[in-house]
Image (spheres, rainbow, N blue to C red):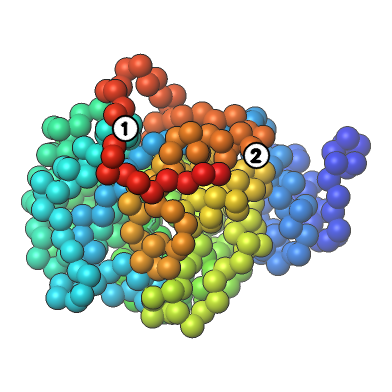
């Protein structure tokens, strides 16, 4: 190891030394390396290594985008134990927006400068696939400059089941209607043992990966996630990450990886303790180190809290999401973070972490605001955050 690096990097767990050697030489880490990184208590050494990789790729830049989350319905047939968002059709709090309501929410996002709509919802028992195609066409027609990051692999699997179309055909029709890329949700932990407990009726891990492969093959890029901090083992986390890395080797279609901290409140797993700050930083750092073929690791402040997301920018994350408006999935599960952050607030958070804010579109191209419709202050949005 070069002397300059040796004096900067202090390793207290000697099992990390060969791993550090590999990281500094730009070599791929193994499954066992991943497990060792999760097992160690030497968080600072792991964070230092992840930050080294992050700075080599992105310098001091921290990406962010201005987006609007739209969750068209919370009615869901899957009843995943991990979820506090989904409802039976007649349960208190169940909702399904009419298309006009969706367009209104989208217009509100555009008036606040959104360049992306992030659209995910429950698996509704009676909404047809045609309804979703109409929603996508309607959004594209009204807001052609906004990127539609819409529908997870799980929703594609469901549409395929109810229409008897292949996932490929479903994806092709959605792409034709206007879907530009796909969010990374629904991946949870791929291992069947874990899925059986946390989301037993959901698309299997294998099918999630197959659908992502197909999406990438037809030119739809996507994100990937991992839900951590429930019943999964270190080995199951590493298995999940390695499976994503293998698919990325094959397709190159993943844009960014987002580790998602489990929020147990109001779920059927409410007895489980929440992941801690150490878990949160470890997940960011180990993801950065293992996913050597992913360009971006995103800190989702909504679930990490703004302070932890800010620290994550020094533990491997190069992107902070986002100016999300009206987030429901985590807030139904007890998240106490605000539902909205202004651009100025987000930029301040990034600068205070010693990084340089860079507004991007969904595919990480720079945003030129002079080419976008003017942003009007929206009196309806009252929740913001001072950081
Ligand atoms: O798929 C559900 C998770 C995901 C809970 O692609 C829960 O840019 C914690 O995928 N506690 C939805 N997590 C969010 C998501 C996402 C978020 C930000 C950016 C992107 C992107 C994607 O949230 C679900 C599930 O994995 N989730 N319930 C819960 N109780």
Residue at the spot x=57%, y=68% of the render? 275
Question: Is residue 184 at least partly visible in the picture?
Answer: no
Q: Quadrant of residue 280?
A: bottom right
Q: Is mark 2 within 8 Å of ligand 1?
A: no
Q: Which residue extends farthest bottom?
A: 271
Question: Is residue 96 at least partly visible in the picture?
Answer: yes
Residue at the spot x=29%, y=29% of the render? 376
Q: Is 203 placed left or right of 386 in the picture?
A: left
Quick one: label 2, few (<14), some, or many (20+) residues within 10 Å? some
Q: Position of residue 119 (x, y in %)?
A: 27, 49
Image quadrant containing the N terminus: top right
Label 1 or label 2, whichever lies nearer to me, is: 1
Q: Position of residue 52 (x, y in %)?
A: 71, 39
Q: Secondary structure at mark 1?
A: loop
Q: Is mark 1 within 8 Å of ligand 1?
A: no
Q: Secondary structure at mark 2?
A: loop
* Image quadrant, ligand 1: bottom left
Q: Which residue is mark 2?
A: 353
Q: Quadrant of residue 255?
A: top left
Task: Give the CA distance from mark 1 to mark 2.
Answer: 27 Å
Q: Which residue is mark 1?
A: 377
Q: Position of residue 104 (x, y in %)?
A: 17, 43
- Image height of 49 relative to 194, above or below: above
Q: Which residue extends farthest top?
A: 370
Q: Position of residue 188 (x, y in %)?
A: 43, 64
- Image height of 309 relative to 85, above or below: above
Q: Is 326 placed left or right of 166 in the picture?
A: right
Quick one: label 1, few (<14), some, or many (20+) residues within 10 Å? few
Residue at the spot x=53%, y=34% of the render? 347
Identify the mark nearer the N-term, 1 or 2: 2
Number of marks in the rendered image:
2
Image quadrant containing the C terminus: top right
């Amino acid at each position: 190891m070069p002397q300059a690096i040796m004096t900067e990097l202090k390793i207290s767990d000697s099992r990390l030394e060969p791993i550090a050697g590999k990281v500094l030489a730009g070599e791929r880490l193994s499954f066992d390396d991943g497990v060792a990184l999760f097992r160690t208590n030497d968080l600072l050494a792991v964070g230092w290594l992840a930050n080294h990789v992050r700075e080599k790729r992105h310098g001091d830049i921290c990406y962010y985008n201005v987006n609007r989350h739209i969750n068209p319905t919370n009615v869901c047939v899957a009843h995943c134990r991990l979820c506090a968002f989904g409802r039976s059709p007649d349960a208190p709090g169940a909702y399904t927006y009419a298309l006009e309501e969706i367009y209104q929410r989208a217009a509100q996002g555009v008036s606040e400068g959104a360049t992306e709509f992030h659209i995910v919802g429950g698996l509704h028992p009676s909404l047809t696939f045609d309804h979703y195609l109409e929603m996508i066409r309607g959004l594209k027609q009204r807001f052609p400059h906004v990127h539609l990051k819409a529908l997870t692999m799980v929703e594609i699997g469901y549409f395929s089941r109810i229409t008897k179309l292949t996932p490929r055909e479903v994806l092709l029709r959605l792409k034709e209607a206007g879907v530009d890329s796909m969010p990374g949700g629904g991946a949870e932990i791929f291992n069947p043992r874990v899925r059986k407990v946390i989301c037993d009726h959901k698309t299997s891990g294998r099918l999630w990966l197959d659908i992502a492969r197909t999406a990438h093959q037809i030119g739809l890029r996507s994100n990937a996630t991992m839900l951590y901090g429930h019943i999964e083992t270190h080995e199951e986390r590493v298995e999940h990450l390695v499976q994503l890395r293998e698919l990325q080797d094959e397709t190159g279609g993943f844009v960014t990886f987002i580790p998602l901290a489990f929020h147990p409140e109001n779920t059927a797993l409410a007895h489980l303790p929440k992941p801690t700050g150490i878990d949160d930083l470890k997940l960011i750092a180990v993801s950065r180190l293992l996913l050597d073929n992913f360009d971006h690791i995103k800190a989702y402040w909504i679930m990490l809290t703004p302070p932890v997301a800010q620290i994550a920018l020094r533990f491997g994350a190069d992107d902070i999401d986002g100016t999300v408006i009206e987030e429901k999935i985590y807030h139904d599960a007890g998240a106490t973070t605000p539902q909205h952050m202004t651009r100025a607030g987000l930029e301040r958070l990034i600068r205070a972490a010693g990084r340089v804010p860079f507004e991007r579109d969904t595919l990480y191209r720079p945003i030129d605001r002079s080419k976008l419709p003017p942003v009007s202050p929206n009196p309806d949005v009252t929740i913001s955050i001072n950081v």
